[in-house]
Image (cartoon, rainbow, N blue to C red):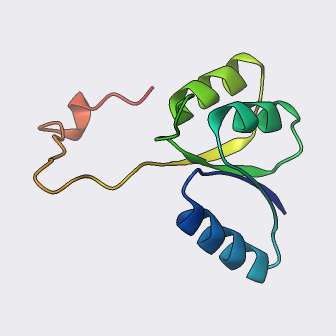
Amino acid sequence: MRILLIEDDPMIGKALLRGLSDQGMNVDWVRNGAEGSAALACAEHALALLDIGLPEMSGIDVLRAARAAGSRCSVVATRPARPRGDSLTLPASPKSASFA
């Protein structure tokens, strides 16, 4: 399986690259949103691991551009860890949740 890793953090990128490669995956690692957007447009990957918190061009913008261009690549989006004291507000009931 060929995987596209879009991650700017060298420590995280190296760990994912090593772990996925050890499992027999072919990994292409790009380090910013512009390179990630261009790589997604090539449609050569079965899966993309996309950091939402990329500098310059956010992961959300990368994903929007890919979908607008017709990319059907499966994407797993990751985000930076929350700073302490930050909280996540969930809807009161599953019926009020919106998934777009």
Picture quarter with the N terminus: bottom right
74 vs 57: above or below: below
Image x and y of residue 39, in percent: 81, 38
Above or below — where is 38 with respect to 28?
above
Q: Tell me: 63 left or right of 45.
A: left
- Residue under the point 18% across and 41% down: 90
The quarter of the image holding the C terminus is: top left
Tally of numbered discs: 0
Q: Who's the residue at 71% across and 38% down the image?
A: 36
Residue drawn at point x = 83 percent, y = 48 percent = 45
State the residue in front, 61 or 96.
61
Q: Position of residue 13 (x, y in %)?
A: 62, 63
Q: Nearer the viewer, residue 38 or 89?
A: 38
* Nearest to the observer: residue 16 or residue 77: 16
Horizontal relation, residue 36 to residue 10: left or right: right
Residue 26, x across and y down, in percent:
85, 66
Question: Left or right: 14 with respect to 54?
Answer: right
